[in-house]
Amino acid sequence: MTRKATHAVRSKKKKNYWPRRIMVLFLLVLVGIACYLGYLVYESKNALNDITTDADPTVVVAPEQSVKVKPVAIMLMGIDTRKQTGTLNTDVMMVAVFNPKTKSAVVVSIPRDSQIELRGYNNRTKANAFYARFQAAERREGLSKSEAEKAAKIDMRVMFSKYFGIPIDYTATINFQGFVDVVDALGGVNVDVDMDMHYVDNADGTNIDLKKGPQKLMGDDALDFVRYRKSNDGKNMSSDFDRNQRESQVLGEIADKMKSFSSVTKIAGVIKAVGNNMRLDIPTSEVENMIKTYFGISRSDITFMPLEGVWKSPFVHLDDAKLEAAKQALRAKLEE
């Protein structure tokens, strides 16, 4: 074979070699992605099993009753379980209705100091203290700590079902650390801090130090932003209504973060983050259905309705018109 012919064969081999190499690399990348996604599913499944330990394992949801096809109402509670305080107050309380047909939701925030005027319930108890009182009552009935916690969540759901005039299907609780871990897992949230926030309490380890203005906050600072009440010198006061607005702002930002393509690979991280800090009495299969159904929901798909009223120590007296508007919005979302 001549030198020219040999060179032609080698050139042809080179031309064939590179496409094959690229295809091999591409296949390796695909295999790697598939393995990683499989790992995410595995990790998410384990975390979901931890999160849904409050669910009744004997309950089987019929296909026509699934969250995939039927609107669902959920009681959401953020619980202060810090060891330094020893409290079980529900500092965040929301009732949310999700509709699978419209891929939308209504979220009503309840001020923590609200006076709940409802027949059969003590109207001298602030809204955020009912959960702890229900637990104490269940313990007096002889239930164990874990049993009393589950029963108290049902008690809260029943009470607010009556209060809003809608059937609330499930309860979800998350503690402070779970909130921090979720925000961190998503890489922080962009918010507009409405005032300078400075507050130190050595007794419970609180050290809030935020400047006014738009900024990205990581988990601890985002929690401080939501919780802030006042400065040590009594200035820059923050009401329940301000905190509810901040909660809505942060939740909206979390929804938008979850929607973004870059967050697809963070879903497992988010679920793992709340694994030890969140509890749902929703069956695991229904949680998976909710993730599939509402993945991609954004802030624009969620109507936030913080209840408002007048502060007359020691209670927030809710505005009747705004309360009625919230009730109608929840009912309407269930009926769409």
Image (cartoon, rainbow, N blue to C red):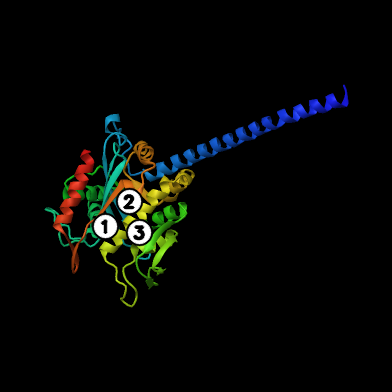
Q: Amino acid at mark 2?
A: Thr
Lower position in the chain sequence, tag 1 or tag 3? 3
Q: Is 99 placed above or below 13 here?
A: below
Label at residue 81? 3
Residue position for label 1: 132
Classify mark 3: helix, strand or loop.
Answer: loop
Mark 3 is surrounded, within 10 Å at the Cα level, by few (under 14), some (14 to 19) or many (20 or more) other residues, namely some
How far separated are the C-alphas under marks 2 and 1? 13 Å
Q: Amino acid at mark 1?
A: Ala
Q: Most extreme residue toward the left, as rendered?
A: 119
Does residue 265 appear to the left or right of 300 in the view shown? Answer: right
Lower position in the chain sequence, tag 2 or tag 1? 1
Tag nearer the camera, 2 or 1: 2
Classify mark 2: helix, strand or loop.
Answer: strand
How far separated are the C-alphas under marks 3 and 2? 11 Å
Tag nearer the camera, 3 or 2: 2
Relative depth, front residue between 64 and 150: 64
Tell me whether circle 2 and circle 1 mark residues in contact (CB < 8 Å). no
Relative depth, front residue between 95 and 84: 95
Classify mark 1: helix, strand or loop.
Answer: helix
Label at residue 258? none
How far separated are the C-alphas under marks 1 and 3? 11 Å
Q: Quadrant of the C terminus?
A: top left
Q: Quadrant of residue 59?
A: top left
| Residue displayed at 38% across by 53% down | 253
Label at residue 173? 2
Please provide percent x and percent y for residue 171.
29, 47
| Residue displayed at 14% across by 55% down | 321
